Amino acid sequence: MIHPGHFYYFSEAKKYGDKLIIVVARDDTSEAFKGKKPANDERTRLENVRALEIVDKAVLGHHGDIFKIIEEIKPDVICLGYDQQIQKQQLEEELKKRNLKAEVIRIGSYMPHKYKSSLMK
């Protein structure tokens, strides 16, 4: 479910580059990070994100290696959501190991007491 918190995140992230590319997590990745199956399958989530005017491109991540998609896209900036479990430092270290240079930015929340997917279900 895409809600105003997502729109805020996307619009803030878009300020950091020429194109907004969204990586949609695979079902197994989402389940591993959140401990439960996502409400919608990865194809539905991908199509919902692709339908948003603000999004220039949306792609699925890879099974197993969540960083492989970054090697393919080679972004200048990576914007993390406020509630994404990966730590900024962890991502920066992984980028360094893979000889990738990207600025990592953590985007703040937008009314998380109201607009958080887990609360809206």
Image (cartoon, rainbow, N blue to C red):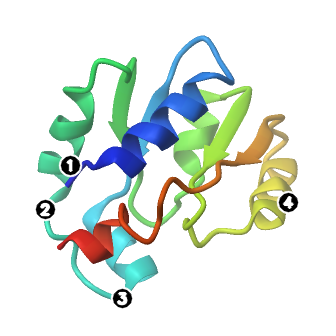
Q: Looking at numbered disc 2 in the image, what kind of residue is underneath it? A: Asn
Q: Which amino acid, by three-letter code, is at mark 1?
A: Arg
First along the sequence among labels 2 and 1: 2
Name the one closer to the observer, 78 or 1.
1
Where disc 3 sits, the SS reads loop
**Is residue 74 depicted above or below 84 in this figure?**
above
Image quadrant in which you'd find residue 54: top left
Q: Nearer the viewer, residue 18 or 11?
A: 11
Residue, x 66% and y 29% (percent of image)? 74
Give the image location of residue 111, x and y in percent: 47, 59
Task: Kindly give the residue lying farthest to the bottom in the view shown.
Answer: 35
Q: Label 4 neighbourhood size at 10 Å, few (<14), some (14-19), many (20+)?
A: few
**Mark 1, secondary structure of its residue:** helix
Disc with the residue nearer the chain's start (4 vs 2): 2
Mark 2 = which residue? Answer: 40
Instruction: For marks 3 and 2, give the CA distance.
Output: 15 Å
